[in-house]
Image: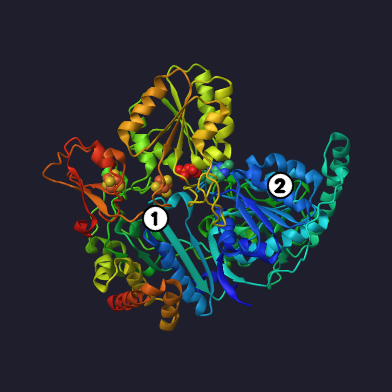
């Protein structure tokens, strides 16, 4: 069969195809996004796949599909599962008919997330199995295994990945899709599907029975395996899972390893069997002490997050080979654990050369792109003395200097509701609540309704760039296109607001500073709530041919730095305060021209710009 | 003594700024290694870090690869599409490793805003940190070949001289990964890069 180099996310998409999945619904979120993007791109003719407005909707849609006997999948990032927690908790009781897998991608290290929650704890809480691959090949295999387990036990299954596994490529062998030939047919059975208390109590009992069976299955499952070393040395036994397994294999090549692909329900028998045969169990797991705590509860003397009084395996951030080398060094140095290791098998610490001290390197944080419509809005907003309740999206970058114009962010949808709370507390300064368009459809509408219904006074803003940009430009209900590329109705934010009872709704172009400032002034000064829809497509998602660009006329430029305060990456300033526009980056958004009082920014034909 | 896995592994680090095309360059290296019959793993940055931030791609190949992430001090080659970014990842390079650095400068907004300054980094300064350095006017030279966007492929040509992958594998990978209309200019860029590293 063909071998391909796939990322973990691409492999899960392929796994969905091979498993015969016919309905997939998800919501974007790094590091999970490419699963559904790939399904849409490559397998859209083989199954129904959609971007839902949020994770709860996505989860429930997939759950509904499963009741017909179809195999279904939902995809989301870690915090997405908080939004979908309600259906998850009860679906565990009700159970599934067709295989149901919820792919949840965690983000140790918080590369692009607001927290570092460990989804394994959620699986424990919800009492559903959790599988976790260690690389792309396993990502595909475990997707298929997830459907088998789900159908054999009638349970939803969580497939957990992490940023490293989702985004690392590895060699994956492709197989033909399984021919399921199912005819979706919902069989009415209220006692089975309706968890009214009388029936839910029975489900509760059966859930515990199911968990016991699952735990036994996990102990026998090929997803969990012991790798005994060839030498017969049984001093060290390492228990590990996920990406951490890869680092263990490099840094502890001599160890016996219990590699767990299926961590919950805990494979107790396997834990005991492994522990009984090694002198010392060491648990190396990313984030929480999920396995370690349970092994200790079983009476196994495991080392993990701590070694005596010392910290050993970090519970913060991602692990890697370098972190494991430090762990190994601590174990070898500690008199209690030193006898477990031979000096000659010590993993060679990379030889380092003494380099001259590095100069101070300028930070290069992510920034709003040149021509980003959010820039004009924040530049206008900065002139007002208000509290800004922000939200999550590209526009969160408005918190960074020089725009530095966001006071709070909590969670998706919070932009509106936190503002409403600040306003209803009778704060001494007016408040502006901001969400993006995807965030508005995700969980902004309910907040809007609250403000209208309960007569709030906050100024609300939707930064409507017609796309879910931060996560890589996915379609949303305002885009007019579906994941599968079909034309569809584009939801109109202003109309939705009016329908909720908002009387004061105004649309502005955020690239027009005067218009945006005027709308903000009216709204902020008004005791009534206002909704401002700042409408301009994201230039990265909706590329236009660039005919003109800007240039600084050095004769007119007074080096005042006003344009630099826009934070446009195309505007570069030297140490001597000379300002230049980088012709390769400018996209002709015309903002800088509006802020220069000396007319030094001139629009020129792109061909005149040259590549200087 | 148990075999050290990392000893049979070749590691390549590619660094630059979001939007410079690092993912395509990484895909070409990985494809060349895969087509040479190796086990391959790669890692790339997605999401937040791509909005003009600093980006890094890692490729590892060998008989059997475990970690996709490269341990510090072990990379065979480091190629940087931007001057200052090369230094941000200097500690990934093995003591004897080769650095290929494009002379391009992309001024970060932190510098324009006055919060930080861009250090003076000429070839001589860079050589202090990279004793084995190929310093390339990649964008200009690619533009001379007919397409400035082939700059990355010049760097690939230079770094290819350090890797045990055949010329056929490289040329095949470029043809597979680059859009048909741009294959020729990229092959030229690749060979120019090889010459520059000789
Ligand atoms: C509950 C939850 N789901 C998903 C995400 C991931 N996420 C972060 S920003 C974002 C998109 C925001 O899009 P939009 O509101 O349109 O703003 P834009 O990025 O386009 O400016 C998403 C989906 C998240 N942070 N929280
Ligand atoms: S991707 Fe679009 S919305 Fe995001 S920063 Fe760039 S221009 Fe702005
Ligand atoms: S240089 Fe001016 S016109 Fe060009 S992208 Fe930046 S702000 Fe817009």
Question: Chain for mark 2?
Answer: A
Calculate the distance from the C-alpha at mark 2 to the C-alpha at mark 1.
35 Å
Query: Closer to the camera, B130 or A418?
Result: A418
For image coordinates 41% across by 46% down, the residue present is A537
Query: Closer to the camera, A465 or B63?
Result: A465
Determine whether A475 is above or below A503 in the image.
below
Q: Are marks 2 and 1 on the same chain?
A: no
Q: Locate residue A294, reporting x and y percent.
A: 74, 47
Q: Is residue A135 left or right of residue A438?
A: right
Q: Quadrant of residue A547?
A: bottom left
In the drawing, what numbered circle is on residue B18? 1
Q: Quadrant of residue A236?
A: bottom right
Question: Chain for mark 1?
Answer: B
Q: Locate residue A418, reporting x and y percent.
A: 53, 28
Q: State which mark lies toward you, 2 or 1.
A: 1
SS for callout 1: loop
Query: Is any atom of residue A257 visible in this view?
Result: no
Q: Locate residue B118, reporting x and y percent.
A: 26, 50
Q: Which residue is mark 2?
A: A123
Q: Is mark 1 within 8 Å of ligand 2?
A: no
Q: Is residue A540 left or right of residue A332?
A: left
Query: Closer to the camera, B187 or B166?
Result: B187
SS for callout 2: helix
| Picture quarter with the N terminus of chain A | bottom right
Determine whether A427 is above or below B81 in the image.
above
Query: Closer to the camera, A1 or A443?
Result: A443
Query: Is any atom of residue A74 visible in this view?
Result: yes
Q: Is residue A98 left or right of residue A461?
A: right
């Amino acid at each position: 069969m063909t071998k391909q180099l796939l990322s973990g996310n691409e492999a899960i998409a392929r796994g969905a195809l091979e498993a015969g999945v016919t309905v997939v619904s998800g919501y974007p979120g790094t590091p999970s996004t490419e699963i559904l993007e790939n399904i849409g791109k490559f397998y859209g003719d083989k199954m129904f796949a959609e971007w839902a407005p949020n994770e709860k909707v996505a989860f429930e849609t997939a759950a509904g599909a499963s009741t017909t006997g179809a195999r279904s999948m939902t995809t989301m990032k870690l915090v997405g599962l908080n939004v979908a927690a309600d259906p998850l908790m009860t679906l565990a009781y009700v159970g599934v008919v067709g295989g149901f897998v919820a792919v949840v991608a965690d983000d140790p290290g918080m590369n692009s997330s607001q927290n570092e929650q460990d989804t394994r704890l959620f699986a424990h809480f919800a009492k559903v199995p959790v599988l976790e691959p260690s690389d792309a090949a396993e990502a595909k295999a475990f997707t298929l295994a997830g459907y088998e387990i789900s159908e054999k036990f009638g349970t939803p299954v969580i497939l957990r990945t992490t940023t490293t596994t989702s985004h690392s490529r590895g060699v994956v062998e492709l197989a033909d899709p399984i021919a399921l030939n199912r005819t979706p047919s919902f069989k009415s059975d209220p006692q089975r599907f309706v968890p009214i208390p009388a029936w839910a109590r029975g489900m509760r009992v059966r859930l515990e029975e199911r968990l016991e069976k699952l735990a036994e299955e996990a102990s026998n499952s090929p997803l969990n395996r012991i790798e005994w070393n060839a030498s017969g040395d049984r001093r060290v036994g390492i228990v590990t899972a996920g990406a951490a397994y890869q680092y263990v294999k490099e840094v502890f090549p001599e160890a016996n390893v219990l590699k767990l692909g299926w961590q919950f329900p805990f494979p107790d028998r396997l834990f005991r069997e492994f522990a009984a045969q090694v002198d010392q169990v060491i648990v190396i797991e990313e984030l929480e002490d999920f396995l370690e705590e349970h092994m200790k509860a079983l009476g196994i003397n495991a080392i993990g997050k701590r070694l005596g009084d010392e910290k050993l395996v970090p519970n913060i951030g991602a692990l890697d080979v370098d972190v494991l080398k430090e762990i190994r060094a601590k174990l070898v140095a500690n008199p209690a654990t030193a006898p477990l290791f031979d000096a000659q098998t010590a993993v060679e610490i990379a030889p380092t050369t003494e380099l001259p001290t590095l100069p101070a390197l300028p930070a290069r944080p992510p920034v709003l792109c040149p021509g980003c419509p959010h820039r004009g809005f924040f530049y206008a907003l900065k002139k007002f003395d208000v509290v800004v309740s922000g939200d999550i999206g590209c526009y969160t970058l408005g918190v960074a200097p020089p725009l530095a114009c966001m006071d709070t962010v909590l969670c998706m949808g919070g932009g509106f509701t936190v503002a409403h709370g600040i306003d209803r507390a009778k704060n001494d300064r007016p408040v502006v609540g901001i969400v993006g368009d995807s965030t508005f459809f995700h969980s902004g509408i309910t907040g809007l309704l609250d403000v209208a219904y309960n007569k709030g006074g906050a100024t609300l803003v939707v930064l409507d760039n017609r796309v879910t940009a931060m996560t890589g430009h996915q379609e949303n209900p305002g885009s007019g296109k579906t994941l599968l590329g079909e034309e569809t109705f584009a939801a109109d934010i202003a109309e939705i607001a009016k329908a909720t009872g908002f009387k004061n709704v105004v649309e502005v172009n955020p690239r027009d500073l005067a218009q945006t400032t005027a709308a903000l002034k009216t709204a902020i000064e008004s005791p009534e709530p206002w909704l401002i829809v700042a409408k301009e497509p994201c230039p990265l998602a909706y590329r236009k041919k660039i005919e003109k660009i800007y240039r600084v006329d050095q004769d007119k430029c007074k080096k005042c730095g006003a344009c630099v305060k826009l934070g446009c990456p195309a505007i570069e300033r030297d140490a001597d305060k000379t300002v230049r526009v980088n012709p390769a980056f400018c996209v002709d958004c015309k903002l800088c021209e509006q802020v220069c009082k000396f007319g030094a920014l001139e629009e020129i034909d792109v061909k005149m710009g040259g590549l200087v | 003594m148990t075999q050290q896995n990392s000893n049979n592994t070749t590691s390549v680090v590619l660094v630059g700024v979001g939007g410079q095309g690092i993912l395509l360059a990484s895909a070409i290296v990985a494809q060349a290694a895969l087509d040479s019959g190796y086990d391959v793993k790669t890692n790339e940055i997605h999401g937040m870090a791509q909005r003009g931030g600093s980006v890094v791609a890692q490729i590892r190949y060998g008989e059997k690869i475990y970690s996709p992430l490269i341990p510090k001090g072990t990379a065979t080659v480091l190629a940087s599409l931007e001057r200052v970014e090369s230094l941000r990842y200097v500690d990934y390079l093995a003591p004897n490793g080769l650095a290929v650095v494009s002379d391009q400068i992309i001024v970060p907004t932190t510098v324009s805003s006055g919060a930080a300054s861009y250090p003076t980094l000429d070839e001589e300064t860079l050589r202090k940190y990279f004793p084995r350095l190929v310093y390339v006017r990649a964008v200009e030279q690619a533009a001379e070949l007919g397409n400035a966007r082939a700059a990355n492929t010049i760097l690939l040509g230079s770094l290819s001289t350090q890797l045990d992958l055949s010329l056929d594998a490289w040329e095949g990978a470029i043809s597979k990964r680059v859009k048909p209309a741009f294959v020729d200019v990229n092959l030229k860029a690749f060979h120019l890069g090889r010459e520059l590293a000789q």
